Amino acid sequence: MKFRDFPATILISAITALVGAVILITGNLQEAAVLGGFIPARAGAELFTPGTPAVPAILTPLTTLFIHVSALQIFFNVLILVITGQKTEQVIGWPQFLLLYVIGAFASAGVYYLLTPDALWPLLGMNGAVSAVLGAYALLYGQPRTAAVGPFSARTVHVAWLAAAWAVISILTGLLQPTPQGVSLFESLAWSAAAPIGGFLAGLAAARPLFMWHWRKA
C-alpha cells in the first residue's frame, strides 16, 4: 500500500494508532476521555470550571476519534479502516474520503446526542467514522442481489438491507458488551450500537454523491 495511492487512509491510520498508543502508555486515558471525548451533556451545559484545558465541545466529535479504551480497540478499528479505506479512497479520492470520515464522526456523535442529550459517558474511538467508511465501501463495491419492491428500486432495497444488517450486528455487539456501572442499558446501547449505526447510514448516504463529485470531470 503506497502513500501516494491512499494518503488519507494511511495518515488517519498512523496518527490514530500513534495518538491512541501514547494516551494508553502514558496512563492519560481518563483525562483524555473527559477533556477530549464527545460527551452529550457538554452541548447543553458547561461542565468544567473556567480555565480547564478541555477541547471545545463542537470539536470533540473529531478529537474523540483518537481516544481508545484499549490497544485491541485501536488494532481492530485501524485494521477495518485499512481494509475498507484504501478501496473506498481509490474510487472517491482522498479529499472526499476525508470528508466522508468527518461526516461519519459527526453523524455518530449526533445520533448519540439525540438519543441521550444528558449523557455524561463519553463516546470514544473511531467506530462511527470507520462505520461510515464501511457503509460507503459496502455500497460502492457490493452487488445488489435483490429485486425492486413496489416503488422502490433494487438499489434502494439493497441500501435498506445493508442498513438493516449493520443495525442488527451493532445492536447484538452492543448487547454483548458489559454495561458500565452507573450507565443504563439504553445509554450503553446508544454509544455502543446506535452511534455506529448513525455513522454507517451517513456513509451509505454520502457514498454516491462523493463518488459522483470525484468523477464529475470524467
Image (spheres, helix red, strand yellow):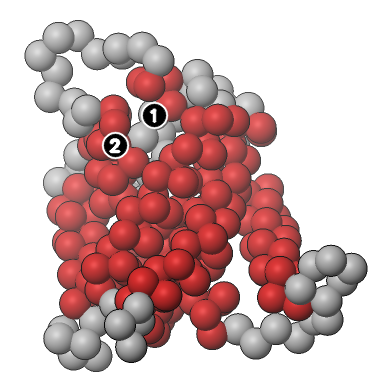
Position in image of residue 124 (x %, y %): 38, 44
Residue 39's disc number: 1
Look at the image and tell me whether residue 214 can be seen. yes
In the foreground, 43 or 120? 43
Look at the image and tell me whether residue 158 can be seen. no
Q: Residue at x 47, y 62 (%)?
A: 206
In the image as oriented, which residue stretches furthest toward the right? 150
Position in image of residue 78 (x %, y %): 34, 69
In primary-sequence order, the first of circles 2 and 1 is 1
Residue 165: quarter of image: bottom right
- Element type where label 1 sits in the image: loop
In the foreground, 72 or 138? 138
Is residue 64 left or right of 107 when viewed as pictured? Answer: left
Q: Amino acid at mark 1?
A: Ile
Q: Residue at x 42, y 75 (%)?
A: 212
Q: Is residue 156 above or below residue 173?
A: below
Q: Residue at x 26, y 51 (%)?
A: 66
Residue 60's disc number: 2
Mark 2, Cα crowd under 10 Å, few <14 / some 14-19 / many 20+, is: many
Position in image of residue 43 (x %, y %): 38, 21
Is residue 150 left or right of 18 when viewed as pictured? Answer: right
Residue 96's disc number: none
Residue 29: quarter of image: top left
